[in-house]
Amino acid sequence: MTYIPNAERYSRMQYRRCGKSGVMLPLLSLGLWHNFGDQTPFATQQAMLRTAFDNGITHFDLANNYGPPDGEAERNFGRHMDADWKPHRDELFLSTKAGYGMWAGPYGDHGSRKYLIASIDQSLKRMHVDYVDVFYHHRPDPDTPIEETMGALDQIVRSGKALYAGISNYGPEQTKRAVDELKRLGTPCLIHQPRYSMLDRHIEQGTTRVLREEGVGCIVFQPLAGGLLTGKYLNGIPEDSRMAKDGRYLKPASLTEETLGKLRALKEIADARGQKLHQMALQWVLRDEVITSALIGASRPEQILDNLEILNAPPLTEEELQKIDAIIGA
Ligand SMILES: NC(=O)c1ccc[n+]([C@@H]2O[C@H](COP(=O)([O-])OP(=O)(O)OC[C@H]3O[C@@H](n4cnc5c(N)ncnc54)[C@H](OP(=O)(O)O)[C@@H]3O)[C@@H](O)[C@H]2O)c1
């Protein structure tokens, strides 16, 4: 059936400016790393994308290697594009990336011009789009000159295959060098995509300072630590959870007594606020406006709706923030 988006989709979502750019991003964005490969029914994927967009989530994030198998999330997204999104392309903000191993041989990994230019061409074909809004270098490559990698991003933007350039997983010094080089080339860095959650605060050790100073946006991935911060693992491993279904990245070994203790203590604060732990975790990553958007994953549409409840919640108080610091370490 033809998809007709909810007419009220922009009324509730809040949008933040991405650094000093002209781009606004929704507080929550949807990532297609998990649950958009060959193991998730097309209809479930479709329901998640529609639910997101119907509620003002305009930004969908992909990468060349999302699946499984590699490339499958982009291929599936191409099918969704044909089914639902062609008439709405200008209302969508789409990203993809290259930087991890994607094909055999010396040209399918890391940060060479050869790899990045070939990869964006492949991604556009799979996604059935003429361009993406952001193309990211997915991780720093210590062996390729930053001038070559940023030169490739600049070329991709100038050729119209992406509208903006981004970097992901770069540390503070690497970020500064990439931002400076892109500035010199005349294609400013729009956005950085690092990991950030109540269980991983590493970006507070320099990266956010650089982004603030340089006016670069920041979309943080795994704000729920892959689901740990939902509290669903407090009493074992539920059968329908990521840890049970796909233990490649979220392993039972991460359920240490130390982590479980922190999760229990954090849940008490969330309970006192009358909200769920994952809602508090999302509000926490968004508490500082240097963070433009929290990039969530989902395995079903209801989770997206549940996470969107943060739009109705009061901000975290100073006292609550201090209590959280005491639990997770400032
Ligand atoms: N740039 C990079 O290197 C990089 C790396 C990783 C991820 N990313 C991006 O970040 C996105 C998000 O990553 P992620 O999926 O690991 O993030 P996440 O938001 O920390 O975890 C998402 C998972 O948490 C569970 N969940 C979410 N909302 C829930 C709710 N309301 N109630 C119960 N469970 C809930 C679901 O797992 P269940 O299966 O248990 O239901 C869901 O798949 C990716 O899709 C990708 O776009 C980027």
Image (cartoon, helix red, strand yellow):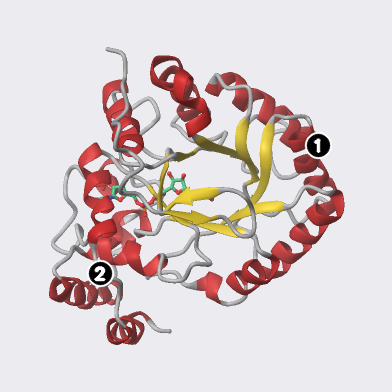
Q: Identify residue for label 2.
A: 314
In the displayed orientation, state which residue is furthest to the top: 1
Q: Is residue 75 above or below residue 300?
A: above
Percent position of residue 327, x then y: 31, 83
Q: Is residue 299 above or below residue 249?
A: above
Q: Is residue 41 left or right of residue 276?
A: right
Q: Amino acid under label 2?
A: Pro
User: Which is more toward the observer, 111 or 82?
Assistant: 82
User: Which is more toward the observer, 60 or 92?
Assistant: 92
Disc 1 secondary structure class: helix
Regarding residue 264, the answer to whether it shows in the image is yes
Q: What's the residue at 27%, 51% (across, down)? A: 308
Percent position of residue 20, x then y: 64, 59
Q: What's the residue at 30%, 49% (across, down)? A: 12
User: Which is more toward the observer, 263 or 78?
Assistant: 78
Q: What's the residue at 29%, 46% (across, down)? A: 242
How many angstroms separate mark 1 from mark 2 (CA)?
A: 44 Å
Q: Where, by quadrant of the figure, is residue 178 drawn?
A: bottom right
Label 1: how many Cα within 10 Å (few below 14, some 14–19, many 20+): some
Q: What's the residue at 74%, 45% (across, down)? A: 111
Q: Which mark is residue 16?
A: none
- Image quarter where the N terminus lies is top left
Q: Where, by quadrant of the figure, is residue 65 drawn?
A: top right
Q: Is residue 299 above or below residue 263?
A: above
Q: Identify residue for label 1.
A: 155
Q: Amino acid under label 1?
A: Gln
Asked if the residue under mark 2 is in contact with the one under mark 1, i.e. CB atoms within 8 Å, the reply is no
Regarding residue 104, the answer to whether it shows in the image is no
Q: Earlier in the sequence, mark 1 or mark 2?
A: 1
Q: Where, by quadrant of the figure, is residue 88 drawn?
A: top left
Please name which of the two marks, 1 or 2, marks the residue nearer to the observer: 2
Percent position of residue 81, x then y: 46, 21
